Amino acid sequence: QKWVYGFGAGQNDGRAEMRNLLGGKGANLAEMASIGLPVPPGFTITTEVCTYYYQHEKQYPPELQAQMDEALARIEQAVGLRFGDESKPLLVSVRSGARVSMPGMMDTVLNLGLNDRTVEGLAAASGDPRFAWDSYRRFIQMYGSVVLGVDHHRFEEIIEEAKITRGVSEDTALTADDWRQVVAEYKAMVEEVLKQPFPQDPQQQLQGAIGAVFGSWMNQRANTYRRLHDIPADWGTAVNVQAMVFGNMGEDCATGVCFTRDPSTGEDIFYGEYLINAQGEDVVAGIRTPQPMSEARAKPGERSMEAAMPAAYAELVDVRSKLEKHYADMQDIEFTVQQNKLYMLQTRNGKRTAAASLKIAVDMAREGLIDQTEAVRRVAPQSLDQLLHPTLDPKAPRKVLTKGLPASPGAACGVVVFSADEAETRAAKGESVILVRIETSPEDIHGMHAAKGILTTRGGMTSHAAVVARGMGRPCVAGAGGIVVDYHSQQLSAGGQVVQGGETITLDGATGEVFLGAVAMVEPKLSGDFATLMGWADSVRRLKIRANAETPLDADTARKFGAEGIGLCRTEHMFFDPERIGAVRQMIMSESEGGRRDALAKLLPFQRKDFIELFRIMAGLPVTIRLLDPPLHEFLPHREEELAEVADTLGADLATMKRRAADLSEANPMLGHRGCRLGVTYPEIYEMQARAIFEAAIETAKETGKAPVPEIMIPLVAMKKELELTRAQVDKVAKEVFAEAGMTIEYLVGTMIELPRACLTADSIAEAADFFSFGTNDLTQTTFGLSRDDAGKFLPYYVDKGILPKDPFVSLDPDGVGALVRIAKDKGRGVKPDLKLGICGEHGGDPASIAFCESVGLDYVSCSPYRVPVARLAAAQAAL
Ligand code: ADP
Ligand code: MG
Ligand code: MG
């Protein structure tokens, strides 16, 4: 079996599509080499070796060593150096690379192959002893901490000492002899810690590093990351061994990390950072300040790569367009320049903000790199959420605390917390938190996720915090060097201002500003690219998208976001208004039909006005109105004074009121006297609501010349008879109102399907219904026999342990609830082939649930107004 795949120097065994076998890094190194880009030669040990290793008590396949020897010999031949040779030593990097990039994995080890003798060879061959000793100390430091597990602070302390002794502040000011001295101290320290000398045999070093990569696949951090991101443990990681190129050989050398477009805005500009005379991760480590790539982005005092190394930069510009053409996507690349010669060390599809993702998709479609459907496919529906959320109100008063780098756009406001754990616990209690760290690391991911925004005092635009925040869509200000964070006393200070943990601050991730206190925010503008992409999505989707809305504000927002109607107007929300609640309570508390009718008469004008407003805003689009659904006791006052007030208006005494309130309380209200059961027992309630709807429709028709088509929805129907009875009430009122007005309008009466019995008898129910709307919240509760209000205690455990793949209240359970939906659809359409079908409920805004609705062939989904764009895009993707 082939366990080792070569790349570079004219032999490319792999391709980009082989990421499962070669890992993302290895597959793309082979791909870049095969399209003629300058990639230092190397080889990839496959992910199957990792799997084998764990299935065979950490033994390697027997053929591996021979294949590796052969691959190494090929590299030696290609570059004219030999591994372990004392005069012309080949040095390699050992790099991990899983299918998807994983922060928990082993860090790369550079300059492997150096020892006390090869370092002299390198010094002689390069004519640059400083470079050789700098490389050797880097190697001992990386290998020592990453492979041998020596605390990296121990190494840093030795360098700090050396700098103090020499009276210099920058690493670059240390000489060859200084580094030689540092190496000696490193080795002594390692030997003291490990009780054995630092390994000198290059073969042993190579074995050690490869073993460490495979070992890291099962470490705590990697396991946690996999669990959080649903990555199976049996994917394994690959290992890449690659000839070194050196960015630390002098002023004509550099190393950098960049994106082929701006990952924050999507702008078509080379974006990133580089450092002259540096190696590996110096750029992101924050030891020296990295410089910008393009002259257009250089600020005063900065030296862009374009200006400093024009030849290598020109080559890179050429590589950039080749890569974008080849991958047809924005790339995140790593490169090194050795003596003005460019080498490519990594490429992958770049992480980007939602705004950038949208702009890049639209731009690339216009540039002809991809087509419109591909552009629609490219943007994650969930990510649109970020674009639809508020930014700082430019007119709002504010007090600037400090400024950092605009690392991930969007505004966020919350209380300051200093640890990821605290961010998580406070967020779980519903608090908005801003996670403040000196810098972040993979251990902080859970806290970053829980936070509304992230603030770091160290690190650049490609620091961990920045990259992860952009990926998650969290606003982030990075590298705010003006802030001093004191974890111990739980406070931060900047320019004489002190902010304690728990106090509120506001971040603007688009400008990098940090403000004291809360700053007012404004609604987002739905820009040109957004509209363009939505238009492309609309042209391919089949499902209609409606919104759940009952207030004029919600209805307005829904229209602005492109809703094609209201799929659920919950009329009870209209009852809580302080002007009306008195009448509602009076209605509930009266013991006679007459008393109820008196109270309902007071409510009628209010309801009518509500509906007129909705009909006006929706201008002829369908509006589904659900008649009263919750159990009546939900409307009762909690305080005795309020109960006394109700007693007053009814002319009854408080004791009677208390008795009546006690009568109304139920053991299990979710399954109690609610939904159409109210309509059946108190027909006057639905009659009033129907009258309000019809009168409003007629008034709107007269006023605008456009008649709305109300869709009246009866909740919680389990039996055909219930629907027949309530429907008859509605039809009777319609007739009366039409007669009074001297005109008729079109309307539908349908039902919510939210009980298993309704699904199973949907054929009979359909005979009395003009439409079905699946109320998937209640249908999920009743199918699982699971109360949504109590599930919080155990559902997370179920999801954590994999008993349930996802929270079924967030993402529709396709096997159980979904099966009932299919049954109801088949039975319903069996009776009425053009029965209108939709869903309302939280699932209407969830992309996976929308894909399910598309597969069942529903007509529409209805979701909250802010989710409408998400649903439009998800519905388009589901149709592709
Ligand atoms: P990560 O997955 O953390 O980005 P990489 O394996 O990409 O780790 O290595 C990090 C950095 O190390 C690279 O960006 C590059 O600068 C440097 N590096 C890796 N391999 C080589 C090499 N063969 N020659 C020079 N630099 C290298
Ligand atoms: Mg790294
Ligand atoms: Mg990398």
Image: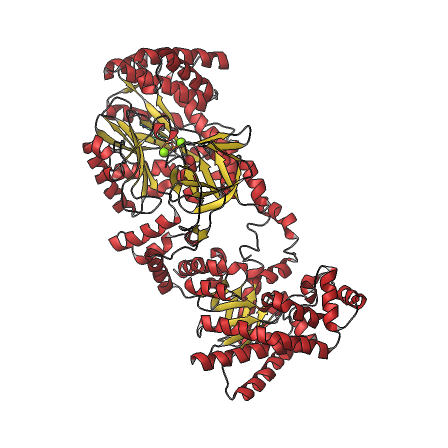
In this rendering, position of residue 256 left or right of residue 396: left
Q: Quadrant of residue 657?
A: bottom right
Q: In which quarter of the image is the N terminus?
A: top left
> Can residue 706 be seen in this snapshot?
no
Residue 758: quadrant of the picture: bottom right
Determine the residue positioned at 40% across, 45% down: 409
Location of residue 710 with respect to 272 vertically, above or below: below
Q: Which residue lies furthest to the left in this view?
A: 311
Q: Visible in this render: residue 565?
A: yes
- Residue at x-position 36% and y-position 41%: 18
**Camera-side residue of 753 and 513:** 513
> x, y percentage for residue 610?
54, 71
Q: Quadrant of the C terminus?
A: bottom left
Residue 492 drawn at (x, y percent): 50, 32
Q: Where is residue 294 in the image (x, y as percent from the top left)?
A: 25, 38
567 vs 865, nearest the viewer: 865
Left or right: 85 as drawn, with respect to 107: left
Residue nearest the viewer, comparing 504 with 228: 504
- Count the marks: 0
Position of 76 relative to 873 (above/below):
above
Q: Quadrant of ligand 3?
A: top left
**Whole-percent x and y of residue 640?**
74, 60
Task: Reply above or below: 45 against 624.
Answer: above
Looking at the image, residue 601 sits to the left or right of residue 693; the answer is right
What's the colour scheme? secondary structure
